[in-house]
Image (cartoon, rainbow, N blue to C red):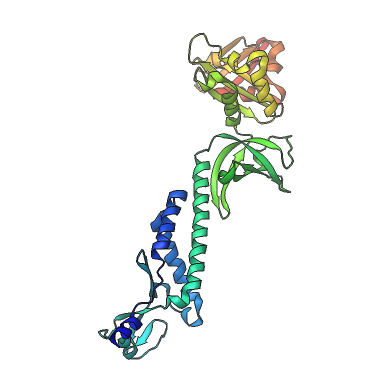
């Protein structure tokens, strides 16, 4: 009889602890999800499942449900306070009933009531499965987020899969488990470009944000670094450090100016970027939908730098403003004035952005 009583009073358990922990260790190796993290998730999920399981459980606070999950097994308890007069059955138990569970309990003390997990087993198993699946998804999203966060400021190739009515373009970038969605907003698109679903497109990664469905990558085709990355891809001398891009000014879809310098003797930085028969810069112009690109030599001398930046116009002289170190006066031949200023002031505007100086252009006749 004593033996039967002992079995009756044993804490109900499900002998799945070792199996769960073995699975969680495999999951940690494959997906990098810590076992301790998944155990806490499972405990929370089982607690919530227990409170939803029956109508009389829903009022039990989460802190009054204890889940003990270890390799020895799965144990659950509902914790109540022993009282002489029960006012809230969800968290209180009459002292006489409590002493049937723990003969030594006193009024005001807590008593742990074992949960019969054999009856709760199916729900527990389903809950555990859902938590593991959700944990895997979260881990994959986290890994993808980290992966694309590290790719910020890189140029990637993607496939257009959707175009919103407002003009935003959605692009698939990456492959397999590393695939993610990227959005190319209207204001990050080159004016005049148009795409259809299925088209390949090169985009520059601006930033990565966490959303409900996973990481959302924000990309651009108007950023000046799009031009920088394209020259790095097309020009081996830039990739190996013989030529350095010092600055870029850009009006997307229309014109860009790029200042370069050689880091080694006997290297022509402009010629390297232009390429044989203009092939390198031509490929970049085609990629940017016909955007014109001026390549100039960077100089430590601001006057020489301004002369180069105003190309293709010829410059007679450049004088720095003695009252303003960020301004200069440029004299050009009369017949070069319109070329120096450019259509709607574009050439002068891009030269000012490139050099960081305010440029006042005057014809020689008015000098």
Between residues 104 and 210, which one lies in front from this camera angle?
Answer: 104
- Residue 367 is situated, as x and y percent measured from the top left of the image, at 63, 11
Compared across the picture, whether 103 is left or right of 260 comes to left
Q: Quadrant of residue 247?
A: top right
Viewer-nearest residue: 142 or 265: 142
Asked if 318 appears above or below 106 in the picture, the reply is: above
**With respect to residue 257, does 277 lie above or below?**
above
Residue 246 in percent (x, y) is at 52, 22
Is 223 placed above or below 246 here?
A: below
Pinpoint residue 211: horizontal percent, then vertical percent.
56, 53
**Image quarter hosting the N terminus:** bottom left
Position of residue 116 measured from the top left corner of the image (x, y, whole percent):
42, 78
Please give left or right for residue 106 compared with residue 275 in the image: left
279 and 12: which one is in front? 12
Displayed quadrant of residue 341: top right
Q: Residue furthest left?
A: 104
Q: Is residue 204 visible?
A: yes
Res 356 quadrant in image: top right
Residue at (48, 15) in percent of width and height:
263
Is 79 or 176 nearer to us in this picture?
176
Q: What residue is drawn where x is 49% and y is 60%?
A: 132
Task: Residue at 47% x, 70% y: name it.
Answer: 124
Residue 184 seen in render: no
Q: Residue at x 50, y 72 (%)?
A: 122
Give above or below for 35 relative to 75.
Answer: above
Q: How many discs mark residues in the rendered view?
A: 0
């Amino acid at each position: 009889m004593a033996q039967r009583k002992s079995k009756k009073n044993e804490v109900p358990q499900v002998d799945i602890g070792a199996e769960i922990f073995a699975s969680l260790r495999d999951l940690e190796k494959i997906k990098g999800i810590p076992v301790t993290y998944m155990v806490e998730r499972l405990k929370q999920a089982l607690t919530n499942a227990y409170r939803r399981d029956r109508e009389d459980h829903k009022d039990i606070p989460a802190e009054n449900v204890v889940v003990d999950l270890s390799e020895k097994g799965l144990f659950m308890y509902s914790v109540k306070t022993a009282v002489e007069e029960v006012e809230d059955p969800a968290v209180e138990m009459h002292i006489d009933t409590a002493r049937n569970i723990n003969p030594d309990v006193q009024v005001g003390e807590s008593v742990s009531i074992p949960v019969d997990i054999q009856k709760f087993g199916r729900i527990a198993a389903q809950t555990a499965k859902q938590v593991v699946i959700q944990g895997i998804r979260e881990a994959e999203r986290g890994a993808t987020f980290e992966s694309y966060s590290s790719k910020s400021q890189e140029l990637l190739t993607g496939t257009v899969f959707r175009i919103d009515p407002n003009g935003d373009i959605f692009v698939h970038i990456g492959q397999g488990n590393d695939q993610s969605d990227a959005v190319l907003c209207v204001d990050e698109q080159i004016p005049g470009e148009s795409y259809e679903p299925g088209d390949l497109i090169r985009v520059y990664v601006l930033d990565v944000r966490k959303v409900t469905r996973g990481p959302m990558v924000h990309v651009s085709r108007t950023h000046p670094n799009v031009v920088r990355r394209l020259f790095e891809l097309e020009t081996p001398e830039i990739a190996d450090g013989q030529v350095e891009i010092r600055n870029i000014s850009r009006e997307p879809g229309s014109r860009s100016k790029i200042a370069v310098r050689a880091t080694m003797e006997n290297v022509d930085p402009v010629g390297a970027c232009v390429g044989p028969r203009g092939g390198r810069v031509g490929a970049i112009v085609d990629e940017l939908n016909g955007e014109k690109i001026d390549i100039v030599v960077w100089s430590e001398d601001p006057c020489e730098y301004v002369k180069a930046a105003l190309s293709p116009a010829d410059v007679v002289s450049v004088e720095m403003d003695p009252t303003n170190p960020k301004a200069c006066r440029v004299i050009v031949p009369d017949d070069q004035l319109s070329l120096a200023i450019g259509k709607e002031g574009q050439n002068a505007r891009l030269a000012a952005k490139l050099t960081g100086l305010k440029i006042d252009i005057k014809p020689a006749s008015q000098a």
